[in-house]
Amino acid sequence: MRLRGLIHKEFYQILRDPSSIAIAFLLPVVLLLVFGYGVSLDAEHVPVALVVEQPDADTAGFTGGFEQSRYFQPVVMRDMHEAEQALMSRRVSAVVHLRADFARRLRQPGGAPVQVIVNGVDANTGRLILGYIQGVWQKWLARRALETGETLGAPVRLESRVWFNSELRSRNFLVPGLIAIIMTLIGALLTALVMAREWERGTMEALMVTPVTMREVLVGKLVPYFLLGMGGMALSVAMGVWLFGVPLRGSLWVLFGAAALFLLAALGMGLLISTVAKNQFVAGQVAIITTFLPAFILSGFIFDIGSMPPVVQWLTYLLAARYFVAMLQTIFLAGDVWSVIWPNALALAVMAAFFLGVSRRKLRKRLE
Amino acid sequence: MLPRILALMIKEFLALLKDKRSRTVVFVPPILQLLVFGYAATFDLNRIPFAVYNEDPGPASRDLVARFAGSPNFREVAVLAHQKQISPLVDTKRVLLVLHIGPTFSRDLFGGRSAPVQVILDGRNSNTAAVLLSYVNTIMTGFNLGWQERAGGATAQARLETRAWFNPNLVSRWFIVPGIVGLLTLVVTTLVTALSVAREREQGTFDQLLVTPFRPGEILLGKALPGFIIGLFEATLIILLAVLWFQIPLRGSLLTLYAGLLCFLLSTVGMGLMISSLAVTQQQGLLGAFLFLVPCIILSGFATPIANMPDWVQQITYLDPLRYFLIILRGVFLQGTPFHLLADQFWPMALIGVVNLLLAGYLFRHRLY
């Protein structure tokens, strides 16, 4: 009964300052739109300079592969100086250089060298572009071998199968990760200020003289924001599936079970920040520092955790988002793989219990 | 006028730094985050766990497997004896790649026929899969060349000689760490400015400030300068760490870099103050800070290239001050780009800053609730 009163009051507070509702519903829409369209690692139509010193039938055969590829947007140039300038000023990302003696050396033992320069500033894209160029080159080799009737150019043929995401659409793995990031923000933002606000305005003292227990205060804060957060989650999943066409291969109840556990952990962290800081300004600063960037960089959402140095890998275990990202990527793309879901769910449950337990302990009916 | 602004600045610094927790939050995390993120944020993969399912008893397949096991990018964790073992290993993420060599591999190769090799990749992270595929391709190409030479057959008629400019080993850290300089500078200045006006409004002290003889311009400067100074100080610290600790080459001129930094600070302080003066409560200020920070970082090209975005999103990125600063940072650090080639990047940031500061100054007086 008392609890109902507290929850009631919290709901009124949410309705009075619409920023909480904005956090739960506006934030996911804006962020998913920005992220979903803005974040892509698929390089297409890469501007590449083709420097052909002496165009003839042989060079045309080689450069034809670039014109047909959807990965490239070739620009033909006549001399290397121009191409280097273009590379320097970032107008092209790579240069493919066929020297004047290309046709002649093609028929000599040793073959013709083709010089390839990529702009290495963005190392990841640089490596992808090199891979695409190799692909064009290998196709060309195979075609030449067929034309000249020789035995096949490459003795070993690679057949690659990509499971769970056969077209390597980066959106399919980014959108589930994004939902985790967005939920991190929602969880922390919703609760980071609520306790601090009561302390700062002195209403916490008013609460203390009432018969409500501190456990009830905590639950009263948790329930409304939990419901708001789950609403935000439902909205994000709906957008991910219907707007961005991400396959959902696992079951809905597992997905929302995972989300509920994660939300408890995230809200618990927000409550803890708020309880300890007792000051909205500091609580807000801590929330900015501890939520978005760590979740963005350390959760495995975009950077592979397995490739980080061991010390940094240990740090990632402290992050709730890490477990949630792993679960979401698996539930969306691979299905209900219990051996992935159980350990991660357990970790989240432990974190939620820890944050809420510590908040409960720190929250005493006592003034300093 | 000057002593009045000075007085306001001192008050702002006190409000920010007198609280021990607030002091810690502003100074310690950015440095820690640079260290952690500098190591964490890399697209390079190493020691990727993979499994081998080799049905071929011959020497050629052993040679191929040895090439994988010997690469620093890969780590062999399982040898499979049956097709059925593949799926559980991949599903549970114990391996990201399975190398499957058929029973006739050596026989085909020695018989001069083309031999297929199957590679199964976990596509849950498509970027990791694409990068892995490029590593696999490199190993395969090496194996093929070696085999052709040994077999004495016709060598390839054209060969690629590849080089990467500005970052010869394609180390992603060189790309990411200069980006983190921009990222953390953005976060710090937002942290200092986004809640500053909102707090005074919520506590009612802003009304008091408005009835003093201070002109709005002076209040604006008093609020803006502390963020500016703290941002400048921390950015310098982070640049020093990037160069001395992470050994990122700094090839261009410091003058260009700092010209960019000043313009960038102007724009972020302006944005932060604008958000802050729009907000009535700190909760709204915090929401505004995130609604600004997150898209700003995502659309800046920090982790994913702007060129990959659809056209209409690319148009939006022109409003993002971090976009320009990242181009300057990476240009100056890695390419040593001279000032005149970067000229187009400076004025948009300055413009964003001035417009937002003017807006903030206007909102000071016109947003009373």
Image: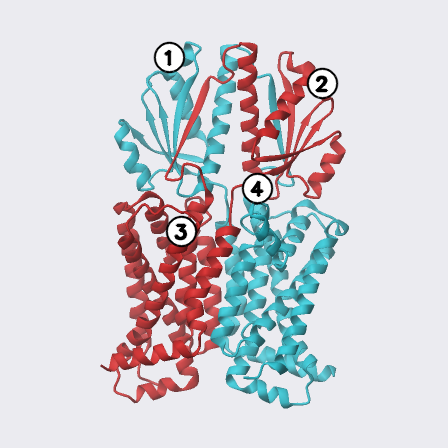
Chain colours: A red, B cyan
Q: Are marks 1 and 2 on the same chain?
A: no
Which kind of residue does numbered mark 4 sit on?
Ala
Q: Which mark is residue B294?
A: none
Locate the C terminus of chain A by quadrant. bottom left
Q: Are marks 2 and 3 on the same chain?
A: yes
Mark 3 = which residue?
Answer: A242
Separation of marks 1 and 4 at Cα, in angstroms? 39 Å
| Earlier residue among tags 2 and 3 | 2
- For label 1, the SS is helix
Q: Which mark is residue A101?
A: 2
Separation of marks 4 and 2 at Cα, in angstroms? 31 Å
Instruction: Characterize the local packing of mark 3: few (<14), some (14-19) or many (20 or more) Cα atoms within 10 angstroms.
Output: few
The subunit letter for the residue under badge 1 reads: B
CB atoms at circles 2 and 3 under 8 Å apart? no
CB atoms at circles 1 and 4 under 8 Å apart? no
| Earlier residue among tags 4 and 2 | 2
Mark 4 = which residue?
Answer: A123
Q: Are marks 3 and 4 on the same chain?
A: yes
The subunit letter for the residue under badge 2 reads: A
